[in-house]
Amino acid sequence: MRSLDKLFEHSTRLLARHTSRRSLIASIGSILTGAALVPLLPVDRSSARAADSNAAPHESGPAPAGAAKHDSHRHAPSAKAATDDPLSCEYWKYCAVDGFLCSCCGGSSNTCPPGTTPSPITWIGTCHNPVDNRDYIVSYNDCCGKTSCGHCECNRNEREKPMYRPSRNNDLNWCMANADSNYHCSVSVILGVAEQ
Amino acid sequence: MNIAIRTILRRSALVYLTQCAAVLAAAPPPLPGEHLTVAELGVTKPHWVYVYDEAFNNEIDARVHLFDGDTFRRLGQIDAGYTPGFNLSPDGKTTVVATTYFSRGSRGTRTDVVEFTDNNTLAITQEIVLPPKRAQTLPSYFNIGYSTDSHFLYVAYITPAASFGVLDPDRKSVLSEIDTAGCVLVIPSGPNRVSSVCESGRLLTVTLNPQGQEASRALSEPFFNPDTDPVFVQGIPTAKGYAFLSFLGEVHEVDFSGPQPAFRPTWSLVSATERGIWRPGGVQVGAIHRTKERLFVPMHRGGEGSHKEGGTEIWVFDLKTHARLARWPLQPYKLSPVVALQVSQDETPVLFAATTAAELAVFDARTAQLKHVEQHLGQTPWFILNH
């Protein structure tokens, strides 16, 4: 009996560990795949480009008043179409951002600021674009290698999950796997339209 | 000038000099020379708190402030590096900080390390260098923690593969790394057990042998549903374990006193009509007075995705009956939303509340009387510990 018990215990433990590992590998794989797919997916970026180009004059100038406004991310959105403004935390793509908006730090909603390095791993959100009424899968890469930007802090958590579901968690420092894991700011890159 | 006037002037001068001499005679002696010393703190008092400041605008400079809830004075500071985890030893005499430094300040070679601070002197007494895998995330009780006998110290790793390190604080060494198969954080129990929270809503519990290596492991049944109502990873210490609150306000009390975690029946912070409207939120989403069995929770009105918004009210519950005893709105005190709560464990308990505006409010935990508001206690105070 004792040997049977041992055999059963051994096989159960093996199964449990093997299954868990497989799911772990699947989770990590999905994160890495999500990151790798950024340049591959056929994605309509026209709305993002239009929005970014609208914001360009603000991004290039010092605009201290504007910066102050956007730093108050927890305030109610302004009446003027904040969902179309990449400098605003209310911008539709930022629905699960937790950090500093790279748009306010020398980059844009999908560009890291000069001298920083994109994180190869990310968390993923699904955000609704009110302009075309579609849901999009958004990859929230961090930009790494410099200390915190400190401007336009934005903390939104639509469908965000705690860190036991890492691919949906924005509390982790996603610069963790970079050679220099110092966090600077976050971008929001459209991966594609979410399938219903 | 005639003689009479001269006489008057002489007499006036004489009177003046006499008065000056009297004043000089009455002056206090000069201050003695001073000796420069360095303060020590002595025995920790029940109303002292260790307040974690992420310093989010310049994250490589996080710190822990020691604050006195009786005198309302800052007592000292522990430097904490970059996105640290921190905790206290079971006897309260040591603060452990698991952190990261870069060799060139904000860049360069990454060094992960655990630093041990003597809570009497606030001086670092030793350190243990870690592999560069430490979980860089929000503070909780479960980023770093001691076994109950202080023999082991556990540090959560995420690379993003999840595991944890087992350290020997006495020998200043890393004993092992335990793969947790995707389950995260370290919830210590007993002298040699560590539980981690899994994506499936289960707890993985690893039992160690005396050398700090894995002896066995077991998965619990699911105790929450991560899809419909996930729990915050911020457990709140109870008499026998931790309470985990869900996004919708369910209370999952887990007893960690036995060989495996045991789950008590869940109960709710909210009524049926309040469910989905009033929610717990913030970073440190509750505090418990363990002998008085009182639970304090920062609550706010909000929908899906509002789980990190701070509380506009503090709700008080009886852990035994699950009755809500009070609602304390914070608006009358003109406080910003509360993101972290802690309560002292003595007979005259004090409730500490950190806000989004970096205020630290000090309340009488029995009456909600506001005793003090410390403005700008650091930059982003997100977590409070005490002993």
Image: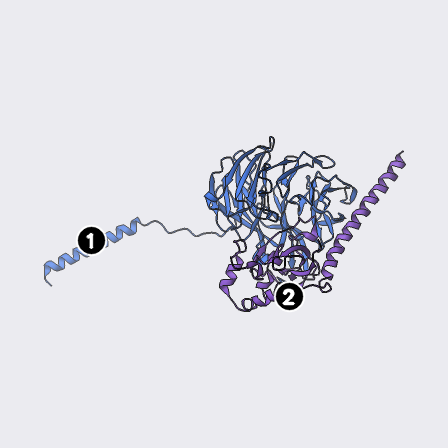
Considering only vertical position in the picture, is B355 above or below B261? below
Number of dots carrying numbers: 2
Q: How many residues crowd mark 1 within 10 Å: few (<14), some (14–19), many (20+)?
A: few
In the rendered structure, find residue B207 and report the number of the disc placed on it: none
Q: Work out which residue is located at the far front of the displayed protein and give it.
A: A132
Q: Which chain, by letter, is blue?
A: B
Q: Which residue is mark 2?
A: A46
Residue A112 in view (yes/no): no
In the rendered structure, find residue B15 and report the number of the disc placed on it: 1
Colour representing chain A: purple
Which is closer to the viewer, label 2 or label 1?
2
Quadrant for the C terminus of chain B, please. Answer: top right
Q: Does residue A96 appear left or right of residue B18 in this picture?
A: right
Q: Amino acid at mark 2?
A: Ser
- Label 1: which secondary element: helix
Considering only vertical position in the picture, is A87 above or below B42? below
In which chain is the residue bearing label 2? A
